[in-house]
Amino acid sequence: MPARRPGIRLDRITRFAFLVVMLGVIALYVGPLHSYVTTRQQASERRAQVEELRKENRELRARRAALKDPSVLEEEARKLGMVRPGERSYVVRGLPEG
């Protein structure tokens, strides 16, 4: 029986090459996967913003509709300190709070 000579074993080289190739394939997936996750997160945030803006839009439309009523409009103007022509504005101070 001939003695085994130390040398390069092809099965080790094959395993090492396979490992290098697999690591390369995995590395190729990392960038797109990160991009995919980031894009999904941004889309989720944008959907939340859109829903918030829709809610605000509904509230503003309801307020606009309410302000078409003259009594509501007058009430808002009085809150701002406005008076009608010919009226006098009075400020009362020193009233007890409560």
Image (cartoon, rainbow, N blue to C red):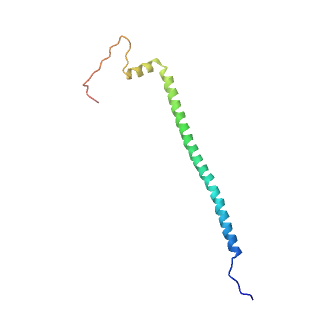
Q: Quadrant of the N terminus?
A: bottom right
Q: Is residue 91 left or right of residue 38?
A: left
Specify the quadrant of the image occupied by residue 71. top left
From the viewer's perspective, is residue 98 above or below residue 46? above
What's the residue at 32%, 16% (across, down)? 89
Q: Look at the picture and state if 8 lies above or below 82.
A: below
What's the residue at 44%, 21% (across, down)? 72
Whole-percent x and y of residue 49?
Answer: 53, 39
Counting from the top left corner in percent of width and height, residue 34 is at: 59, 52
Residue 3 percent across, percent down from the top left: 71, 87
| Residue reaching furthest to the right | 1
Residue found farthest to the top: 86
Which of 94 and 22 lies nearest the eye of the viewer?
22
Tally of numbered tags: 0
Query: What's the residue at 64%, 56% (across, down)?
Result: 29
Q: Is residue 10 above or below residue 97?
A: below
Instruction: Tell me the quarter of the image containing the C terminus.
Output: top left
Outermost residue on the left side: it is 94
- Name the residue nearer the viewer: 57 or 69: 57
